Amino acid sequence: MRKTTLVNIFLRSLLIHATLNFRRMQNLGFTMAIIPLIRELKLNEKESEAFLTKHLQMFNTHPYFTGPIVGSIVGLEEEHASQKDELFDANAIKQSFMASYAAIGDTFFWGAFRPFAAFVSILLMYLGLAFAPVIYLLIYTPVHVWVRLKGFIEGYYRGKRGFEFIRSLNLPGLAVKIRWMSLGVLIALLLWLSRSGGYWPFMQTYNIVIRLAAVAVVLLCMFLMHKGLTQLQLLYGAVAVFVVISWTGLMN
């Protein structure tokens, strides 16, 4: 297949979430992404209709992992078109990939990496860095673009074994480490706010007490994690506490 066709398909796959619908989720975006394959395979009108109908079935996964699935399907469609294999079931392969990829993507990107990038940016904002939002983009964007692009390439060349690339990344294990890092960044933010002349009340008089309280919060988090709470639950709990404090006016 021509490289220009593959580039075209990959770029289209970046917009797969734009046509999300409640009935069949990402099916329109997926089909739109692989339309260049029709021209590449030189399908006639009847074959093109069957091709589009087949791929307009229900499809839904994490948007960052659509690249690996699109790559696998493109490679397999090209292979089986040349072999005239009538037993090829693209939807079965898509169904087998999309559930596990959705779980991995939600756990890593939504549950770990995006909050981490946000916490780092917030800390840098409190440190007075005007480009904190840019830092967020520099942390977050390259990672998900690389997963999409590399996953698409590996999926295209590996076909049904395209999942091996995602598995090799060990993203669930990496998510646990990133959540620990997020907790560390949140603690750093807490210590920064408790600095001399910071944003907490009675800072000048009770500076040492505030710092000891920050250490106590860290120990409490470790105790709660030992009791079974996840890092993500602690992070959301901390946000809830800060919201309550702001509403009650204790920060003023």
Image (spheres, rainbow, N blue to C red):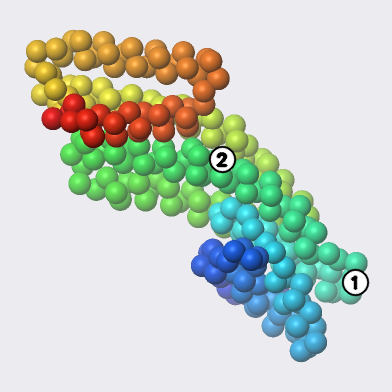
Asked if marks 1 and 2 touch (Cβ < 8 Å), the reply is no
Q: Residue 143: horizontal and vertical position, in percent? A: 49, 48
Residue pointed to by mark 2: 107
Mark drawn on residue 70: none
Q: Could you say which is closer to the camera, residue 115 or residue 69?
A: 115
Judge left or right: residue 11 versus residue 114. right
Q: Residues within 10 Å of mark 1 (few under 14, many from 20)?
A: few
Residue pointed to by mark 1: 86
First in sequence: mark 1 vs mark 2: 1
Q: Residue 13: horizontal and vertical position, in percent? A: 58, 66
Above or below: residue 53 compared with residue 130: below
Q: Residue 187: horizontal and vertical position, in percent? A: 33, 24
Judge left or right: residue 189 versus residue 74. left
Q: Which residue corresponds to the image point at 60% horizontal and 35% vertical from the top-left? A: 172
Q: Is residue 156 visible?
A: no
Q: Residue 175: horizontal and vertical position, in percent? A: 54, 35
Above or below: residue 33 compared with residue 131: below
Q: Which residue corresponds to the image point at 59% horizontal and 69% vertical from the top-left? A: 29
Q: Secondary structure at mark 1?
A: loop
Q: Secondary structure at mark 2?
A: helix
The residue type indicated by label 1 comes to: Glu
Q: Which residue corresponds to the image point at 54% horizontal and 41% vertical from the top-left? A: 108
